[in-house]
Amino acid sequence: MGKRIIYSFLTFLLVTIIIFIFFQFIPGDPVLSKIGLEPDPALEAILRAEFGLDRPLPERYLRWLGNLARLDMGTSIRFNQPVNKLIAARLPNTVALAVLSFILVAAAGIPLGILAAKLNDTKAGTLFNAITQIGIAIPAFFFAMILIIIVSIKLKLVPVTAYVPMSKGFFPFLRGMLLPAIAVSFSGISITVRYVRNSIIEELESNYVLAAKNKGVKSGDILYKHVLRNAMIPIVTILGMIFVSIVTGSIVIETVFSIPGIGSLLIAAIKTSDLPLTQGICVYISIVVIFAYLLLDIIYMLIDPRIRLKE
Amino acid sequence: MKKAFQNRNLLVGSILVCFLLLVTLAGIFYTPYAPNAIDPNALLEGPSIKHWGGTDKLGRDILSRTMVAGQSAFLMGLITVSSSMFTGVFFALLAGYFQGGLGNLIMRFTDAFKSIPSLLFAMMVAAILGRSFASTAFAISMILIPQFVRMTRAVVIKIKENEYIQWTKLVGLGSIRIMFLHILPNVMSTVIITASLAFAEAVLTEAALSYLGLGIQPPDPSWGQMLSQGQSALRVSPWGVLLPGTMITMLVLGFNLLGDGLSELLNARTAKPE
């Protein structure tokens, strides 16, 4: 496990290096753009020293990393506020959307996957298969628009811009988040259904199931008491993929439903060329993803002793 | 060949991709209306005999625009998949053949790069290089490289252990010759499968970027952009988003099925030599 943590830390360093170097390639010079049309060499040197731009690249990277460790990600140009404060203010909406989506993936994906395994080799199973294939292929924002057309415009169940801030009550907020969460989780649900289905079908062909059948154990008992437990272990491995699909999905879906979250903040930052804010959000999301992968690996090691023994 | 027709994924996938390719290619020579022609007398119309896909808020024909936007989608897929394929396979050959120092370095970078969510990376590129077809193509190519590296490297390592490769070493052939003349032909099936799945991802990423206004910029039409424009008039004309959205879904579905089908077909063949 120690090896895995070191490995995550290495990945983290590499990712920060990639992002740092990337943001050095910005066309235009931030100092020159600040002084204006008639550059005064003395003023230019002072400003360069103030921004630390006169130092060599590795030193600037280390300083940036040190600031990052103290949660100092610089100041947004557009909002003129610290980047970490801006992120913190938008975080609850994004986390709420992600958590709700994750719950939907688990609550719908696993039971539907079991159902799909039971329906294997039937016409309904084929239909199931087709729907999940479409679920993986359809862009989340297009699916969101279909949801808006059906649920909001035709059935008039929820208003089109349904976002309600949490300060106006938890349940109205939750109601507003439901449609976005369904849109975000659709592909995750589809991935989970396919994976659970294949995993169960594979387990059902193993020898212990055959032995149990021959002993006369009821097929329901075989499925729920033995197969399911073994089939669930590999599902942890796709959780990382689902997590990433939820994170990127919510970046786009926040824009569709005009939810003030980190995703819509990022897009506004890019469109207004607010580079400190863009860089801050990119680093922030990457760290969350690396940490999530590490956490999932640890969970996997804990529930599957075979992996632990290999180390 | 007979097996290829029995494989449902492969069959449906090829039909979808061929159909969309035909529609797109037809758009080069003929569209029902000029894709940018504005008609103030036909704003936000639903589907009709005159306009099969309806019209947008400027009265432009959605079917014509969808056909032309398909060219951007296919071109983007073609450019990004081929460039990432060449780069990715090259690094995979190196990483698989020289396991240890160089190989490890390549894999560390690949892994680190993979842990940045691909859409996020593409947005970063848009922030730095600006929003255009070229920067979108660059971003998507970069995103796709790790998949080619990982998938191909695994096969290279397996093939390297084969007797005939060991023989080429004994005979005294150089590493570069072994890699490109003897290992490369054997990884092609994996590369083709990966390319098909990568094409689907390229289309999906381009659509998302263009929808967010960070990808292909107007006046060049793209499906993502059409969806974004259609969304602003969703209440008046829900039809506007259906055609471009369905095209994205069908193209992604087609390449996913094609990839799955090829993988079933080709892997079955390598597993059981006939």
Image (cartoon, rainbow, N blue to C red):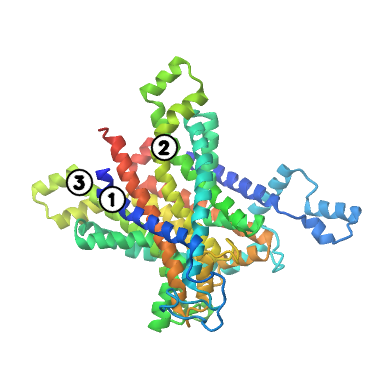
Task: Tell which tag, 2 or 3, sits nearer the viewer.
Answer: 2
- Relative placement, left or right, of A136 versus A25 is left
Q: Residue A184: in sight, yes or no?
A: yes
The disc placed on residue B188 is 2
Location of the C terminus of chain A (image quadrant): top left
> Helix, strand, or loop for circle 3?
loop
- Amino acid identity at mark 2: Met
Residues under numbered marks 2 and 3 in contact, where contact means CB atoms less than 8 Å apart: no
Nearer-the-camera pick, A138 or B105: A138
Q: Which mark is nearer the camera, 1 or 2?
A: 2
Which residue is denoted by mark 1 in the rendering? Answer: A199
Give the residue type that dot 3 points to. Glu
**Front residue of B3 and A290:** B3
Q: Quadrant of the N terminus of chain A?
A: top left
One can see residue A284 in this view:
no
Taking B164 as reference, is A84 above or below it?
Answer: below
> Which element carries disc 2, helix, strand or loop?
helix
Label 2 crowd bin: few (<14), some (14–19), many (20+), radius 10 Å: some
Mark drawn on residue A205: 3
Q: Position of residue B241 (x, y in %)?
A: 46, 72
